[in-house]
Amino acid sequence: MSRESHRQHVVVVGAGFAGFQAARTLARLARRRVDITLLNPTDYFLYLPLLPQVAAGVLEPRRVTVSLSGTLKHVRLVLGEADGIDLERRAVGYTGPEGERGELTYDRLVLAVGSVNKLLPVPGVAEHAHGFRGLPEALYLRDHVTRQIELAAAAPDAATCRARCTFVVVGAGYTGVEVAAHGQLFTRSLVRGQPLRAGIEPRWLLLDIAPRVLPELDRRLSTTADRVLRGRGVEVRTGTSVKEATHRGVLLDDGDTVDTRTLVWCVGVRPDPLVAGVGTPLERGRLVVDPFLNVPGRPEVFACGDAAAVPDLAEPGRFTAMTAQHAWRQGKAAGRNVAASLGIGRRAPYRHHDLGFTVDLGGVKGAANPLGVPLSGPLAGAVTRGYHLAAMPGNRVRVAADWLLDAALPRQGVQLGLVRSWSVPLDTSSPELARVPGGPAERTPDRENRPGAEPESKPGAEPESKPESEPASKPEE
């Protein structure tokens, strides 16, 4: 796409739910009257809600990725990670995939950089736990779980066998519940081909300091999820968290010690560190915007998704939760309002109405409340999968085909070895990218020295906001 000197240039930073929708909506409204550039570290949009199915071997990785260049017509894609915003010069600095430096100037800017794993000051967690925010982490977890079952089957003693087939998931929000639900089914299928010692079965523990699983949802959905998990043998421990992690196991805050080689960190997320350096007011690490998604005092700058603190017009005095559904809808609103700022259409404030939630519990099970009607079992599972097919911007036939194959054929229990443990550290500003030997240095701003950076939470502290910023599954308006 060529640039013309008299045409306005819009730069969208980030291609998650918010950025993807902002670019798509703006391209549709502008009809090639505006130059649009999308800056993103990868060339795909990741449909996060189906990531647990990738880790469990239900879906192949490319099924949950949608090509940006193939989907966003008339949008120029620039591969790179933004590492600096200069509001005065109206420029975005970035580092390309091979370490090269670049800069994009803009007339309008949409910041949709999303979020990264939320860290707590728990000894050993950063070194021994892995998050679940990107495709590399899902691929690593699938290989790791497969490897642990294989090593457990060949373990020389019962204690080692039990430790290797014990899996601990911290955080019982959407991601943690779905990882535990799918993971338990995955390991059950693996041990059919790799029998363990007599009397030993894969053990899954789901921990959370909250009093119940899915604490941000209706209690009926929480009860359904809890019943399904416990019915499959998952040990659900509420009011409990990790006090210390080592390479041999975890010490819980109730004094119990669990021998394990697997610690999955799903306690929630925090805004991408990039936004703290923008220099505008923050609300718990998120850029403060008005109901039109404009940064106050900067009419040319918009922000949406997890990086933005958007006023919740349905609940005055509060901000919208950091969820995929808000990001998806805010992206549309941002695209419309950017177009309006360029003389195309009229701007409108962001408003939302909850139509219900869906939670995938693996197999044919699910929990859902579309339009407030509570559902469970196979019906909820069907509603959940139907929603995902409708919401995905591509790959619907391929996803449906994988689901059919999974129902008819046993899963392939092999490790590809493509992603190693050191490639997916928990403390990363780029969970969508796996580290590679000799690759460019990662952007890791010093949190304590950044202006406006909020303090980290302490173990056992209440979450920053009740709803977690995780890939929640929720019907669109």
Image (cartoon, grey):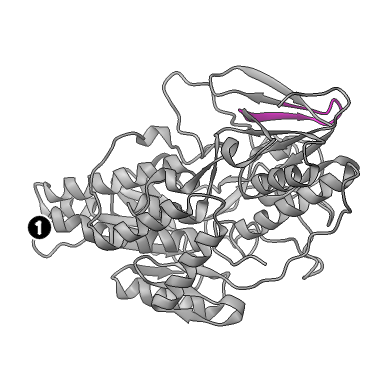
- Taking the view exactly as shown, the residue that stands out farthest to the front is 31
Residue 364: x and y, percent?
36, 70
Q: Is residue 129 visible?
A: no
Q: Image quarter for residue 255?
A: bottom left
Q: Is residue 88 magenta?
A: yes
Residue 205: x and y, percent?
34, 62
Task: Please give the count of numbered marks on the rendered protein.
Answer: 1
Q: Residue drawn 33% across and 68% down?
A: 235
Observer-nearest of 406 and 306:
406
Q: Is residue 43 visible?
A: yes
In the visual, does 201 lie left or right of 234?
A: left
Establish if 74 lies above or below 307. Answer: above
Observer-nearest of 50 and 147:
50
In the visual, does 97 lie left or right of 195?
A: right
Q: The disc labelled 1 sits on which kind of residue?
A: Arg
Q: Image quarter for residue 108?
A: top right
Q: Residue drawn 55% across and 27% down?
A: 442
Residue 414: x and y, percent?
23, 44
Q: Main secondary structure of the magenta part?
A: strand
Q: Image quarter for residue 317?
A: bottom right
Count neighbours of disc 1 (C-alpha within 10 A) and say few if under 14, some if 14 to 19, many if 20 or more. Answer: some
Residue 132: x and y, percent?
46, 48
Q: Is residue 9 magenta?
A: no
Observer-nearest of 104 and 382:
382
Q: Residue drawn 47% across and 64% down?
A: 172
Q: Quadrant of the N terminus?
A: top right
Quickly name the residue at label 1.
197
Q: Residue drawn 81% across and 68% down?
A: 316
Q: Secondary structure at mark 1?
A: loop
**Residues in magenta, as a range:** 79-92
